[in-house]
Image (cartoon, rainbow, N blue to C red):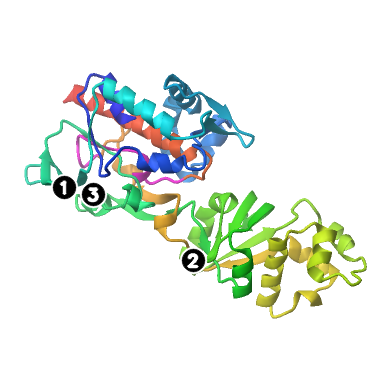
């Protein structure tokens, strides 16, 4: 995005990429359908960025979701709004959009230099790159750093830039997993039976925060959309306390009294699992979670009264013991402190050096918010460079 703005403004632009081809993380983002942005009103949209919203507001307002949709359509990829309000290209994939974008950049004169990993500056202040042919120094009138966080390092964003900027006195908040899964010490029986099983239509709660949606059981824990939406709160609890207590409501639309009535009928010869499935419409994985909670409390689920079962159904405690590795997180929290940047996304301590995207200190849930802010800050940094070049 920065390159596009810069070349439109008359600058000569080269994009240096550590990887052998462009947009590898962009392609990964589109693996299950490229969620470009979200259709909700801008005030609600901006609230998704939490405490970073005021810092991102000007950039997103200058390039809002409707502008991103128009940009995609101009590249031959019209968009549609899904049932959840998320916005996707009609092709649903990232590759057609990326190919069209790269063709347009190439036609505009943007050059690409692949297999160039930035490793700092040389003794003359020039950009220093590691390449297959050795080190290479580049003189630049201005530079935009868009180096990502530290998730999916095999796609290029390994967080190696943190020490380079910290050595120049730039304050960088520690990179932490965001939109990530969490570790749970499942019993062997639960792990073997329910790994890969989805939990649908549930409400997840930590403290005062509740999210409705879906989750997925993994061999080592739990992940999925509703978990990602709570990942900031869950992560901070794990970091502060060493664990987090997640509460799961399997039937959030039913009151305990209604569930108690349903469960007070005669079970007869039915197994408890079959009775719960029929009386409360619970899935096998939901019943498995109840069994895990009962075992953790030192009791057998079969010993629970109808009222106790009803209460447990909508308040299953799950102890999260850690975050999944940052390498597997969808995105990362932390990064360059906004106080280090001026209004044009230039680093105050490094005149002519700008930064954009996920390497800045913000996070957002999945739903199109990650790409939207990355696009918007890239565009803002590009405009900032044009202003800098005019002044200098």
Question: Can you say which quadrant of the picture contains the C terminus?
Answer: top left
User: Residue drawn 25% across and 44% down?
Assistant: 18
Q: Which mark is residue 71?
A: none
- Local packing at callout 2 (Cα closer than 10 Å; few below 14, some 14-19, many 20+) is many
Q: Which mark is residue 165?
A: 3
Magenta part of the chain: 348-363
Q: Nearer the viewer, residue 112 or 369?
A: 112
* Residue 4 visible in this rendered orientation of the protein: yes
Of the residues under marks 1 and 3, which one precedes in the sequence? 1
Q: Nearer the viewer, residue 89 or 85?
A: 89
- Callout 3 touching callout 2 (CB < 8 Å): no
User: Residue drawn 45% across and 25% down?
Assistant: 72
Mark 2 sits on what residue? Answer: 322
Mark 1 sits on what residue? Answer: 132
State yes or no: residue 349 in magenta.
yes
SS at badge 1? loop
The image quarter containing residue 279 is bottom right
As measured in the structure, the alpha-carbon distance from the residue carrying label 3 to the one carrying label 2 is: 29 Å
């Amino acid at each position: 995005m920065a390159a596009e703005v810069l070349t439109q403004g008359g600058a000569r632009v080269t994009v240096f990429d550590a990887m052998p081809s462009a947009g590898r993380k962009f392609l990964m983002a589109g693996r299950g359908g490229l969620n470009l942005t979200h259709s909700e009103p801008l005030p609600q949209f901006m609230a998704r960025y939490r405490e970073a919203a005021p810092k991102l507001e000007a950039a997103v307002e200058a390039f809002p979701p409707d502008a991103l949709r128009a940009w995609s359509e101009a590249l031959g990829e019209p968009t549609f709004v899904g049932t959840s309000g998320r916005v996707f290209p009609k092709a649903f994939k990232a590759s057609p959009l990326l190919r069209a974008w790269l063709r347009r950049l190439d036609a505009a004169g943007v050059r690409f230099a692949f297999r160039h990993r930035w490793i700092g500056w040389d003794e003359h202040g020039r950009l220093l790159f590691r390449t297959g042919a050795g080190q290479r120094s580049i003189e630049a009138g201005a530079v935009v750093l868009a180096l990502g966080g530290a998730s999916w390092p095999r796609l290029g964003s390994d967080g190696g830039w943190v020490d380079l900027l910290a050595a120049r006195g730039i304050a960088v908040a520690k990179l932490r997993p965001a939109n990530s899964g969490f570790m749970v010490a499942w019993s062997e029986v639960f792990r073997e039976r329910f790994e890969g099983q989805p939990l649908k239509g549930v409400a997840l709660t930590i403290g005062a925060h509740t999210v409705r949606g879906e989750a997925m059981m993994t061999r080592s824990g739990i992940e999925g959309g509703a978990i990602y939406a709570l990942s900031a709160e869950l992560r901070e609890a794990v970091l502060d306390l060493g664990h987090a207590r997640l509460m799961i409501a399997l039937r959030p639309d039913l009151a305990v009294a209604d569930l108690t009535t349903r469960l007070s009928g005669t079970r007869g010869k039915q197994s408890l699992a079959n009775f719960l499935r029929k009386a409360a419409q619970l899935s096998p994985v939901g019943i498995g979670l109840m069994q895990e909670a009962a075992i953790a409390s030192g009791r057998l689920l079969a010993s629970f009264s109808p009222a106790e079962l009803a209460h447990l159904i909508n308040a299953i405690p799950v102890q999260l013991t850690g975050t999944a590795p940052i390498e597997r997180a969808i995105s990362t929290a932390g990064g360059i402190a906004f106080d280090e940047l001026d209004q044009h996304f230039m680093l105050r301590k490094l005149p002519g050096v700008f930064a954009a995207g996920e390497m800045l200190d913000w996070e957002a849930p999945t739903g199109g918010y990650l790409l939207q802010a990355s696009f918007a800050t890239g565009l803002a940094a590009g405009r900032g460079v044009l202003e800098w070049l005019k002044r200098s």
